Image: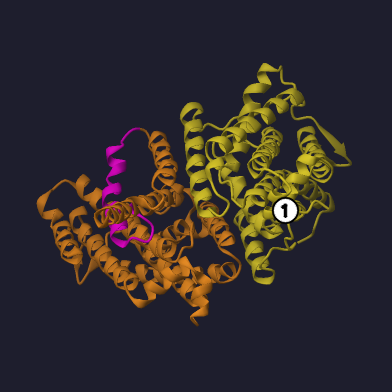
Amino acid sequence: MTVDAVYLLQLTLNGITLGLLYALIAVGLSLIFGVMEIINFAHGELLMLGAFAMVFALPVMGLLYWPAMAVAILATMFAGLLIYDVLLARLKTDEFERSILITLGLSIIIIHTMQYIFTATPRLVDTQYGFDGVDIGSIRITWTRVIGAGAALVAFGGLYAVLRYTQFGRAMRAIAQNREAALMVGIRPRVVARNAVVLAAGLCGLAGAAISPIQLVTPYMGQFLIFKAFALVIIGGLGNIPGAIVAAVALGLIENWIGGFFEIAWQEAAVFVIMIVVLFLRPDGLFKRGGMRVG
Amino acid sequence: MKLVVALAAALLLAALPLLTTSNYIMGVGISALIFTVAAAALNLIYGYTGLLSFAQLAFWGIGGYATALTVVTFGGTFWWGLVWAALINAVVALVVGYPTLRTNRHAFVIVTLTFSLLATLIARDWVDLTRGALGIPNLPRPTAFGFEFGTTGRFYWVAWAFSVAMLAFLYALCTSRIGRTLIAIKQNEPLVRAQGISPMPYKLASFALSAAITGAAGGVYCFHLGIIDPLFLDFYYMQTFLIIVIIGGTGSFWGVVVAGVALSALPEVLRFSADFRMIIYGLILVVAMFVMPSGVAGWLRERRRGRRRGGAQ
């Protein structure tokens, strides 16, 4: 097999974009796990809600990309707040299985309500950028992909700054590192948990909004993405944010390379095989967890 | 007493094809029997051993495909198909379970979940083996010693015999010393270690057994449907098993069996649209987790305990 350099570069660039979007989802899951030690099964549905918000906001905004994205993020943050206050706030920290089952029920309710109202017909999102792109030599990347990747990078920068330099973020790290000690210095776990869920939901909304012009929007889109995000969280180490980002970008690349040269079944299986191998070699994930680290 | 009631109920269920000629009712009966077995297998790993496994869906699908492919592609019999389904699943469970169980129960939940979603994608995308979205239609009815289980009524006996055998096996297992060890692992693993018992072989064995039984159940069920396609790995099945176990009561053998038979009729009663039914399932799951986390069996146990305490005063 001769490897065409241009083709390879194209796959690589697509892989990085996709990986950054995976990372947005995985980081939210990791953040919630770090603070509450639960897994939010309905996380993929938040992404789907973000994408649907984009679908409906864009025509209203006259196809303007950024305001529609802001609407999507705000909508998912609100959904996250609602989920926390109605369901997650009732959980105790050691109720891992219960959290999964409750958010699983929620995810089913959201998927099928959306499908009932909006049908399962895939929707195509059109933005002000249409299908225009940048050309680098003979490689072409659509603007929506470039912007999606850029927005993800900005979001990670922002997240780093928040977790590192603000009281709001320090409280989250404190809870993740040592719950008792954090309680002793007067940090309220419920407030911090709510902040973490809303923040994670916002990141997920951003991912949904960024992905909607790239992929078709259906009520099931969250499920296909979330299962990769779960695997990434395990590969990177549960609750480890930089680990999740590195694992996500790596997976995006590997998937695109495999998808470019082998059958599609291998592309889907890659994430699982990697996860099992990582668990064999390093049971705590590639990047061992020591509290929630940001740098 | 419980065993006498169970035996009577089993014999009564066996007589169903004699009581009705309706293929619809017998179809519901087959679903009830098979779902109960799959839920009881989930109860073994989740209710007894305390490991929430979402891989049951994958095992169900792998079992279905293994049985169908044995018959259609490799020209074996239905019975050998079931044996292969059980064996393949047991091996897969060991391969997936060993690295995962070394970590913690959080990782186990997520890995099994990912595994199930992966199985769905493989069923759809590995077209050479599974024939992709078209599936394998026209699965032949099984035969034994020249007797063809050709009608729904006759196939019902196959499902009945299979379920009774599997449930009897699970009952014997769960009430034995092994079953008590599994409960101990769920309740206090350090204590089990302190007693000189290594939890790992028990966890692996219960995972592999529950995988094998779920796989064989999937094999029987897909021959009831007569077709297998990627929809056989719809999350709906996993949810049904979970709801049966949760409503019945995790770790309660009879609770799950009764809930299995009762709740399998529920989708038939709730014949709205598929979406609406799923929404109701989701609501049941969320509400049950808050209102009675230990199921009906747990709720009854609490009440009995409360009354005894009340009587003593």
Placement of the N terminus of chain B among the 4 image quadrants: bottom left
Placement of the C terminus of chain B among the 4 image quadrants: bottom left
Q: Position of residue A124 (x, y in %)?
A: 63, 29
Q: Position of residue B288 (x, y in %)?
A: 40, 44
Nearest the viewer among B227 and A90 is A90
The amino acid pointed to by label 1 is Ala
Q: Which chain is orange?
A: B
Query: Vertical placement of A70 versus A205: above or below?
Result: above
The magenta segment is B248-272
Instruction: Say left or right for B269 vs B117.
Output: left
Q: Residue at x 69, y 37 (%)?
A: A211
Q: Position of residue A256 (x, y in %)?
A: 72, 51
Colouring convention used in this rendered image of the protein: by chain
Query: Vertical placement of A95 versus A137: above or below?
Result: below
Image-quadrant location for residue B290: top left
Q: Residue furthest front?
A: B313
Residue assigned mark 1: A244
Q: Numbered disc 1: what chain? A: A
Image-quadrant location for residue A207: top right
Q: Chain A takes which shade in the image?
A: yellow
Count of marks placed on residues: 1
